[in-house]
Image: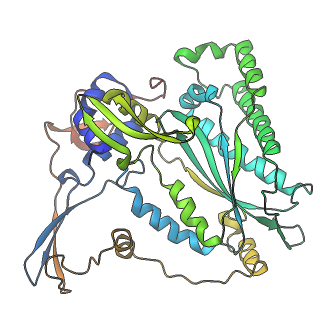
């Protein structure tokens, strides 16, 4: 089966030669290329009973790697199960208009943080209004930057509690449909986002490069804002979950997704990549798209998040500071059983994922202790190791491959 790793291994060096990448893009690309290969080292397992041996190479654990998300997702799901309430939940999606794609990409951290802030303010302010619910609510927000065709498509998935805590400490349940009308949500979201965007502009917190430089002119930026104010912004609510048990499993499908999974890639041939995608403008029909390898890499790298950026955030009753106080009270008020769950080990999570007992030898089934031998990392192919004072891939003062083609950009200005 073809994978993103195969594409990077075949065409990554050529892409780096001709394009400037940010440090985060370099790191992600390098990690994906090396994932589960001898370059990251590993260990050798040997059965004492039959002598069967098996080599396992280390994973890169990069959050953009399609191979490394399953275990991270399972661990996250395990950690969230103690925060469930015995109530209904809603799934709400907020989308940024495509008109803002280039500005968003050139100001990633600024706009991404703005999106989290505005979505939180919109939900909290409307939920606290007695016209709708009149309570403090809780929700988890997960940001995605991609559409099915790997183009920039910034949107936020929110899983919202179906009720909230009143000012006098009583639980108020929402009706079966979402307690805030979608049109009200959409207009509040649009107004708040554009208001804060204008503030950022006035404070010179936004950068404009390439085709967007004209927006440095105040009149042109005002025209853009006017156009965006006159658009309907897409906010929609999916049907509520049947029960609380479905919530975290469902949300887990969104929390650890990457731009494209390996199972969507069909083949790599003649410097092109073909992959499956769903066309939502054509009744969600599944189609096949073929791109040049260069264009595929460009689109994938658009979605590499800035280092340290948190794409999953909890708010209100689900926020960290409320988990031991208000959330505990909510569990009592909603008659949610207090479950003391033991944290699953990494081995248990892996066994759950692959459906195999890893404590037994795959050859003879013996449960005897198995010997482990650590395997060192192998040097990168076709590269000389040299001391580089400020290596953009390995870090300050590290031994690393001295790659003549490495080009590092500090800004996100070249991908559109």
Q: Residue at x 54, y 19 (%)?
A: 209
Give the camera-side residue of 70 and 62. Answer: 70
On screen, 390 above or below 323? above
Q: Can you say whether 338 is above or below 184 in the image? A: below
On screen, residue 326 above or below 110: below
Could you tell me if residue 396 is visible in this image? no
Residue at x 58% of width, y 20% of height: 208
Residue at the extreme left: 51
Q: Nearer the viewer, residue 389 or 54?
A: 54
Q: What percent of the width, then of the height, locates residue 226?
A: 77, 21
Q: Quadrant of residue 392?
A: top left
Residue 85 appears in view: yes
Location of residue 240 in the rendering, given as x and y in whole percent from the top left corner: 69, 61
Q: Residue at x 13, y 36 (%)?
A: 382
Q: Is residue 87 shown left or right of residue 263?
A: right
Q: Is residue 212 above or below residue 72?
A: above
Q: Nearer the viewer, residue 383 or 327?
A: 327
Picture quarter containing residue 216?
A: top right
How far from the left and from the top, in percent, is residue 377? 18, 54
In front here: 264 or 373?
Answer: 264
- Picture coordinates of residue 354, whole percent (x, y): 33, 69
User: Which quadrant holds residue 12?
Assistant: top left
Residue 92 located left or right of residue 25: right
- Is residue 279 shown left or right of residue 396? right
Colouring rule applied to residues: rainbow
């Amino acid at each position: 089966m073809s994978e993103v790793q195969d594409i990077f291994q075949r065409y990554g060096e050529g892409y780096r030669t001709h394009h400037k990448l940010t440090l985060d893009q370099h790191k992600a690309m390098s990690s994906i290329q090396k994932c589960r290969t001898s370059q990251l080292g590993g260990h050798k397992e040997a059965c004492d009973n039959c002598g069967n041996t098996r080599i396992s190479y280390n994973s890169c654990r990069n959050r953009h790697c399609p191979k490394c998300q399953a275990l991270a997702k399972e661990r996250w799901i395990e950690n969230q199960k103690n925060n469930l309430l015995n109530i209904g939940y809603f799934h709400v999606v907020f989308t940024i208009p495509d008109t803002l794609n280039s500005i968003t990409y050139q100001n990633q951290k600024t706009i991404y943080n703005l999106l989290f802030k505005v979505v939180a303010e919109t939900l909290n302010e409307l939920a606290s209004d007695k016209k709708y619910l009149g309570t403090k609510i809780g929700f988890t927000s997960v940001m995605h930057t991609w559409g099915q065709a790997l183009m920039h498509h910034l949107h936020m998935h929110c899983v919202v509690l179906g009720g909230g805590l009143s000012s006098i400490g009583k639980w108020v349940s929402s009706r079966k449909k979402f307690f805030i009308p979608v049109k009200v949500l959409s207009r509040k979201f649009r107004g708040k986002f554009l208001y804060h965007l204008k503030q950022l502009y006035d404070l010179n917190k936004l950068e404009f490069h390439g085709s967007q430089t004209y927006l440095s002119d105040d009149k042109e930026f005002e025209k853009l804002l006017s156009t965006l104010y006159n658009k309907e912004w897409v906010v929609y609510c999916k049907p509520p979950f049947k029960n609380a048990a479905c919530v975290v499993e469902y949300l887990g499908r969104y929390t650890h997704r990457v731009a494209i999974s390996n199972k969507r890639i069909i083949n790599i041939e003649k410097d092109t990549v073909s992959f499956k995608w769903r066309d939502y403008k054509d009744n969600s029909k599944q189609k096949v798209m073929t791109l040049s390898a260069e264009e595929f890499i460009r689109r994938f790298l658009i979605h590499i998040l800035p280092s340290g950026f948190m794409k999953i955030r909890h708010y209100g009753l689900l926020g960290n500071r409320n988990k031991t106080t208000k959330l505990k009270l909510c569990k009592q008020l909603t008659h949610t059983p207090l479950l003391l769950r033991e944290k699953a080990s990494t081995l248990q999570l892996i066994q759950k994922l692959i459906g195999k007992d890893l404590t037994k030898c795959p050859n003879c089934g013996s449960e005897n202790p198995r010997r482990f031998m650590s395997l060192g990392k192998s040097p990168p192919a076709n590269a000389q190791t040299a001391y580089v004072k400020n290596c953009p891939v390995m870090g300050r003062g590290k031994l690393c491959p001295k790659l003549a083609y490495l080009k590092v950009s500090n800004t996100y200005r070249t991908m559109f």
